[in-house]
Amino acid sequence: MLDQRVINIINENKGFVAILAGSGSDDKSPEMKEGEKQRPSHLGKIVSSLESFKIAYGVNIYSAHKQPEEVNAIISEYNQLIKPILIVAVAGGTDALSGIASWTSDHP
């Protein structure tokens, strides 16, 4: 699942943020009210901040409810890497994604 580019970045030990999003809708901007400026999405805000500090990141979109095997598989892959990474979960509703990530991940 993790491509070699991501593994190489993590192994450089300069920091890496693994973003887990519950669905593609987390990457959509909120609905705008009349006269309101376009606001960035949840993922957009996180990605913009990481890019401004030149921190490497990867985005994985999996539903904890519909794709639990894939969520566990990606976290297992991250757990095999000994270099430090940070996992950020972005999910709405019941947010099972954060619970699975915090329970199964060796990383903060």
Image (tube, rainbow, N blue to C red):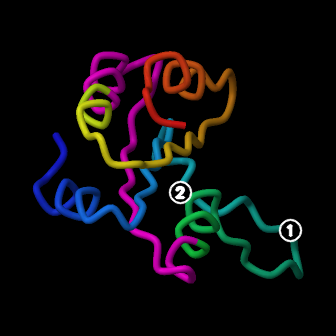
Give me the C-alpha separation between circle 1 and circle 2. Answer: 18 Å
Residue linked to disc 1: 33
x then y, percent, for residue 89: 56, 40
Label 2 SS: helix
Q: Does residue 26 lie above or below 50 as drawn? A: above
Residue linked to disc 2: 27
x then y, percent, for residue 29: 64, 63
In the image, 1: left or right of 75?
left
x then y, percent, for residue 86: 49, 47
In the image, 2: left or right of 17?
left
- x 23%, y 57%: residue: 11
Q: Amino acid at mark 1?
A: Lys
Q: Does residue 51 lie above or below 12 as drawn? A: below
x then y, percent, for residue 19: 47, 49
- x 86%, y 68%: residue: 33
Placement of the N terminus among the 4 image quadrants? top left
In the image, 42: left or right of 55?
right
Q: Amino acid at mark 2?
A: Asp
Per the rendered image, the range of residues in magenta is 50-75
Q: Does residue 80 lie above or below 19 as drawn? A: above
Label 1 SS: loop
